[in-house]
Image (cartoon, rainbow, N blue to C red):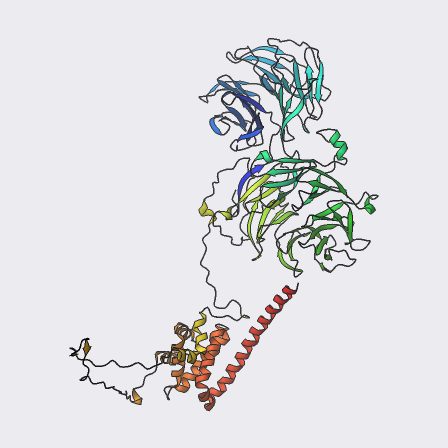
Amino acid sequence: MGHSKIFLKNRALGYVSNHIPLVTRYIKRRKENLIVTCVGNSFHTYGCSHFTLLSVSGTHPGEITSLAGDVYHIYTACGKEIYAWRRGTEIKHVYKGHDCTVHTLLPFGQHLISIDENSNVKVWNIKTEELVTELTFNNNHFKITTLIHPFTYMNKILLGSEQGQLQLWNLKVLKSIYTFKGWNTPVTALEQAPAIDVDETIFELVQDWGCVISISFRTDEYPIMATGSLEGHIVFWNLEQRKVESQLYKAHFGAVTGLKYLPNEPLLVSSSPDNSLKLWIFDLADGAGRLLRIREAHSEPPTLIRFYGNKGDNILTAGSDSSLRKFSTITEILNKSLGKASFNRKAAKKKGRLVEDSLLMPPITDFATEITREKEWDNIAAIHSGLGTVTTWSSDKSRMGEHKLLPEKFKSNRNIVATSVCITKCGNFVVIGYNNGHVERFNMQSGLHRASYGTDKGAHQGPVKGVMVESLNQIVITAGRDAFIKFWSFKPKIEPLAKMTLDEPVEWLRYHNESSLIAIALEDFSIILLDIDTRRIVRRFEGHKGQLTDACFSPDSRWLITASMDCTIRTWDIPSSNLIDIFQIPEACTSLHFSPTGEFLATTHVCNLGIYLWSNRTLYSHISLKAVNKDDPIPMIGLPGSTIEDSDIQEDELIEAELNYISPAQLQDDLITMSDLAHSKWQNLLNIDIVRKRNKPKEPPKASENAPFFLPTIPSLELKFDFTDVNNTETNKKMITHPELQNLTSFSKLLLSIEDVQFEEIIEKLKSMSPSSIDFEIQSLSADEKTSNILLLRFMKMIHHMMEKKIDFELIQTYLAVFLKWHGTAITENESLRDYLNILQEIQSKTWFLLRDKLFYNLTVVQALKKM
């Protein structure tokens, strides 16, 4: 086990019930009946009044194998252990002692009876968790399948077996009281009848629908018994008249494993492995039942999942059961069913709630949605397995639409199959690709055919595996199994605007509405990114070892998340082209989608009925998104449960130690690097004379007058000082220095001391100086006649060194300009300096041509993008 760097398990949606029978409890404090259903490794508690989900239990170590309840606790069996839950969420007791899986539980006053697959019966004290007593049976002679406690029989239980026999036992003395021969067929259900103390066969009732797997008796003075069958039907028997009172045909799409009448009420609760929970009320004139409330989800695994809308709180899913559903990420009360696809919607509507198998369309394999016109007409288009007909649906009205889209030219050919679909951003048109290579356009409002793309033979040679329309309805893009990507004008023409040839046939394409990127899955398990603007392949991601099932972009289009039949989900960083996250799941992901807010990643998986949500950890914590090492093991992560689990992952495990990245002085040898100095450090150097002139004071500074310490005053009404004795003389002294005593500047001394190639120290010293200091130092190079030529040559070599390294380009040009301004005449008069100037000119031209080519290339690309 491990963890993903980006995604954290959140919770699972779309689970209601499974094959474990439901449990009903009356809570006196709430004055309400509660219904408990099992959903795998946890259980749900619903309120009967509104079918509201009240609580979800914690996650068990494995699948729950048995469920029971009394006034105080809910009891669950998981493997060899038994748990007692209080309030549906708190574990109060754990009972350990069985050697194999427990399959039946029965609360028995202060005790709990449990039976495992070896037919070992154990009796526990509920409060102390102590084993009170146990019984052992031989599976070859009496394999226990079920048990009940007969009313008014103290300390006695009735056991049913696979061999058909029944045995009545007294648990207090551990003695078998009576054995019923049975009917030589397995006992599948035992239920206490309203008539008590009857221990003989009074009459037999035969159910035409096959095996009876659940029984319940009505307790509100009506002699009615309900039985459930494997076919999903419920039969109601009048026990006094000994005949069928009524029946609910196809009450469930799976076996009716859970069946309970609520105490003293005309209400019946039923559950089934078809992932539904239903409440029936018997208030009709003929005593028949009608559906009062329902809580359901997909009865078969979902095939496609997409977030709907811009808020990220609704998810549209298509299932193998031919249904289209909307799930809310906020509350299950907002879940909606858009119904099942029917060939004849009006006929199916007359049939009532159920759609006949003959009218049921094949499962939805792909669909497209658009919210722009959802209030005005149908806004969902769905393609079905093996059909050329595309159905329309309304999200606003939560039902199947009236239109079935199929061109007239294809109606006589049953081999035509729709393979891809796309709705335009305006919501007015739907574009459909077919397996014969044709691409057709329909109007969503009227359902009329509007255009065809390509010739009479089609747009592609072979199936069209992907279609999309860019946001402005200017270009239609199609991808086919013939390994061609074609760009068409929205107004149809025979020839495409452009086409691209790929190395491999296309499996499908996914696009991002707010960017110009298209993800295209290829047959060799790789995925490429195509830029619509430049019509070029900009990225290629390789690494999956199985067929690609789905992909999606993050909201900001920086990530691409892909899923494959190799049971991995990978996250690719598009700007850096790196794999930044990978994790493995137990069952392969069949579809995935990122929420528009970036909060959740939703996934569906093989053989799983649920929709699984994964939290995006980067929204609330700092995560290191370094590239994944190919040699690192791939972490295995279990699927999320029905409740949000506390993560046992430490935050320190996710924040990897990041080394401080120091950019090198030169990224590549064929590039030229500018300096990181402020512009004032080198721009002012070119105009240093103008700056000095501008900063020069208008009048020269005046020397202060020599005044006596005590200033005499002049006799007058106002205070005035007498300056007649003050001498106002200016001293103008000049400093005379002997030529032999002149010293070089520190910069000149450093330039003389260095060797031919080691210029790094003096370059750094120049960068640290102010513009006026640099100008002074360059002027001072010729101050000393003995060393002037050496200093000038050294400075020219320093410039050559910087040009050769392709660093600090703008500084080189500035230093060279100032150098030539002050010493140009001296260079022309010296032969060695003149010869080296030619070398300097050659490398100057080389670096300039390189920089010019790079600039012109980028300018042309920008201009080309502006014209598109």
Asked whether residue 359 is in view, the answer is no
Q: Is residue 508 above or below residue 819?
A: above
* Front one among 117 and 350: 350
Q: Is residue 699 visible?
A: yes
Q: Whole-percent x and y of residue 771?
A: 41, 76
User: As drawn, which residue projects farthest toward the bottom?
Assistant: 829
Indicate left or right for 367 with 810 as reference: right
Residue 661 image position (x, y, % from top left): 46, 60
Number of dots carrying numbers: 0
Left or right for 831, reference 200: left
Q: Residue 417 falls in which quadrant of the image?
A: top right
Q: Is residue 690 above or below residue 301?
A: below
Viewer-proximal residue among 53 and 180? 53
Q: Quadrant of the C terminus?
A: bottom right
Residue drawn at x 46%, y 47% as measured from the top left: 653
Please state the horizontal and vertical placement of residue 553, each as a whole percent of the image: 60, 50
Q: Judge whether 448 appears above or below 493 on screen.
A: above
- Tell whether 309 sits left or right of 771: right
Q: Residue furthest front?
A: 717
Q: Say which of 403 and 561 sits in front.
A: 403
Q: Left of 80 or right of it: where is 199?
A: right
Task: Estimate the x, y position of residue 623 in percent, counting from the top left.
Answer: 49, 50
